Amino acid sequence: MQDEQIYTLALSRIPGLGLTGAYNLIRVMGSAGEIFRNRKRLPELVPGISDKLVKALDCPEAFKRAEEELQFAEKNSIACLTINDEQYPSRLRECEDAPLALFYRGNTNLNVLRIVSIVGTRHSTAYGQDLCQRFIADLSELSPDILIVSGLAYGIDIHAHRYALQYRLPTIGVLAHGLDRIYPSVHRQTAIEMMNNGGLLTEFMSKTNPDRQNFVKRNRIVAGMSDAVIVVESAIKGGALITAELAESYHRDCFTFPGRVNDVYSAGCNALIKNNRASLILSAEDFVNAMNWNTNPSHKTQSPQAIQKELFPQLSEEEKLIVRIMKESSSDLQINTLVVKANIPIQRMSALLFELEMKGLVKAMAGGVYRLL
């Protein structure tokens, strides 16, 4: 396992390769280790690969840096999760620009069934902070098994983390730098508390500065590892809107709170609603209902009657698995929940659910939720 970690980290450091190039090689060869072990044979195994790239893979400096990082990780109780690792966030893995590896320090499962990202402006107002607190307080009652994700930045991000801790919800901070520092430093105490109920996650190696472009890259992890993104407050431009746009591209649900028409830090939220880029919510109950995450027995739908398999002889094994999972659930299921339970990639899951819908077995509901008929 450590060999694959070293190979993966080294692959991410090859000059001129890039994330797309690395994925193309992994897709053909199966793993980062196979790429390096068969480096000299790559021209015959990978159509179109250039001699320049083959030579670039002979890079001792990349391996040296990878080994140094793994030593740092081991010394500081940091897990290195490669793209094929079981602990790697499965939702994020399905995104075409997912990091090859992640560094994680914490105690929470990154593949729990319900994950929501809460983001917003760094210049949060009393209105936004109050929304954030009320939302998380109510969410902890309505859906106590949820994981809260944000970016540990000033404003809405840090309030989301702190309120999650206050109401005993696990929370993950996605960083724009390595785990050898906390930025901003004033959030260090909160970060320490998070490692006891949640954790810190990053794609960046130690000694990486929190440069501007890293925050944009960080946002794709915030969006990609969650079921839904909630924008609490945002100006007409900002990182929160980038995260919302990424969420849309990943087929994640996006929600936002409205604000007064003349409030600068609600202008972005109002624009998302106006342009049908996000669903309007006023409360945690609105959100839980839209996602069909009700855990209160009084809100659950009745379990569907058992379906006789012999009546549907044309179901594939994957379709049977989905039907079985939905039968065992006491409520409707969100597509990302099905992805996690069935361990089927989201693109494939979408196609299978469409087939089941055409066969009259499931019905698509709002919020990416599916009901067994």
Image (spheres, grey):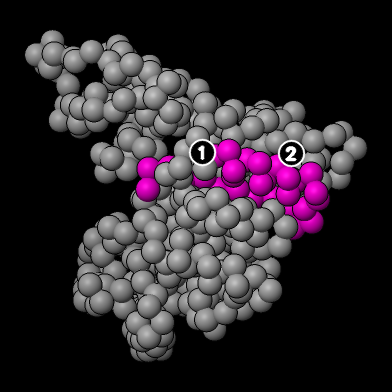
Taking the spot 52% from the left edge, 42% from the top edge, the residue there is 140
Name the residue carrying label 2.
Answer: 269
Name the residue type under label 1. Glu
Above or below, comparing residue 344 to residue 25 in the picture: above
Task: Left or right? Give the position of 4 relative to 137.
Answer: left
> Residue 208 location in percent, x, y?
56, 79
Which residue in the protein does label 1 denote?
141
- Nearer to us: label 1 or label 2: 1
Q: Which residues are magenta?
A: 112-139
Residue at (59, 28) in percent of width and height: 286
Is residue 120 rendered magenta in the image? yes
Between 303 and 62, the one nearer to me in the picture: 303
Q: The residue under label 2 is which amino acid type?
A: Cys
Q: Residue at x 31, y 13 (%)?
A: 373
* Extreme residue toward the right, this view: 262
The answer to which of 316 and 102 lies nearer the viewer is 102
